[in-house]
Image: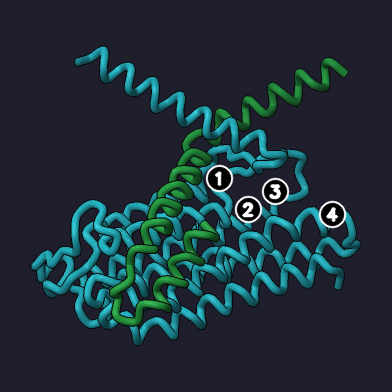
Amino acid sequence: MGIADYITLCNGLLGTAAILFIILAVEDLHQPYYQGGLKTHYIWLAMLCILASVIGDIIDGPIARRYSKRKLLGGSLDIMSDCISFCVAPALLIFVMFGRWGEASPFWTISLGIASCWIIATGMLRLARFQYDDGSEINYFVGLSSPGNALLILSFAGLIWIQPSVGFGPDLTTWDCSICFGKGTPKPYFDFMMLPLMFISGGLMIADRPMSKLKGGLPMKLSVIQLVRYASCDNISVNSYH
Amino acid sequence: MLVAITSALIHTTKSEHGHEMEGLNLSFYLFIISALLVLAYIISGKQVVEKSKQIDDSVSSEE
């Protein structure tokens, strides 16, 4: 085993640590919002582990290409650790964060469970395709990469989770809908958005859409420029319509 | 995002009963920025790949 293989192994262990923190967080999540605040620091520790795994995944590729001789071992290890850290751990995290143990309706719990399974299934398909395509010469990803999926899910989960505590936007809601969400206990207003987000994110992983590998920093700058251009074009079209 | 999560972790651990939540503003805004950056990456993925290809082609033709 080379140094890159050890880093990959650590990535997998970080994903496992994230799952352990998620299990520890379950007890706190009976009442996550207490006096307007959050007391579930295990959730943040799990997110931190997943993010550390993303950073490890970024650095182990170049190290493996430079120093590792046994590429087959590294490739297989990478796929397995990616599956734990960027598919299983984020899916479980969302299920635990937004599942509202004992308070949610079966409809909500089952929907969230299906969305979590969708993330894991599409992630496995994505990783299998990545391993198949790895020998080809293309210098971009086909579909959203699994770390990209983890970052997308974590960003929005964190945002929706702390939004009621910062006093920006709607406060905690008690939608009293026994069929859709369950009992009328306080919950973040936008938590329903996680369902479509998870289905879209999973769909993007198995889509044929080309995605940049973000090497050298130029593609990220281009991404931001493109987005600003879209936003400005939309504004212009909306203003001209009015 | 790393700063956002670390800041949220620090403030959550400090305030056992959720009294000192002011520090979460920073996490909130950083989460917004990271979500927007990921969206920018996803939305403009195809165009960025094409532009990168064009830039690579122009550089190789100049050489």
- Badge 4 is on which residue? A65
Question: What residue lies at 52% left-to-right and 49% top-to-bottom?
Answer: A206
Regarding mark 2 in the picture, which secondary structure is present there? helix
Q: Earlier in the sequence, mark 4 or mark 2?
A: 4
- Badge 3 is on which residue? A133
Instruction: Provide residue A141's location: percent of width, then percent of height.
Output: 63, 44
Q: Earlier in the sequence, mark 1 or mark 3?
A: 3
Cα gap from disc 4 to disc 2, whole angstroms: 20 Å
For the question of whether residue A198 can be seen, the reply is no
Q: Are marks 2 and 3 on the same chain?
A: yes
Q: Among all residues in the image, which is located at the extreme top?
A: A240
Question: What residue lies at 33% left-to-right and 67% top-to-bottom?
Answer: B21
Q: Earlier in the sequence, mark 2 or mark 1?
A: 2
Q: Nearer the viewer, residue A146 or A154?
A: A154
- Badge 1 is on which residue? A143
Instruction: Provide residue A62's location: percent of width, then percent of height.
Output: 79, 53
Question: What residue lies at 52% left-to-right and 60% top-to-bottom?
Answer: B3
Quadrant of the image occupied by residue A115? bottom left
Q: Nearer the viewer, residue A13 or A38?
A: A38
What chain does badge 4 belong to? A
Colour cyan maps to chain: A
- Badge 2 is on which residue? A129
What chain does badge 3 belong to? A
Q: Amino acid at mark 4?
A: Arg
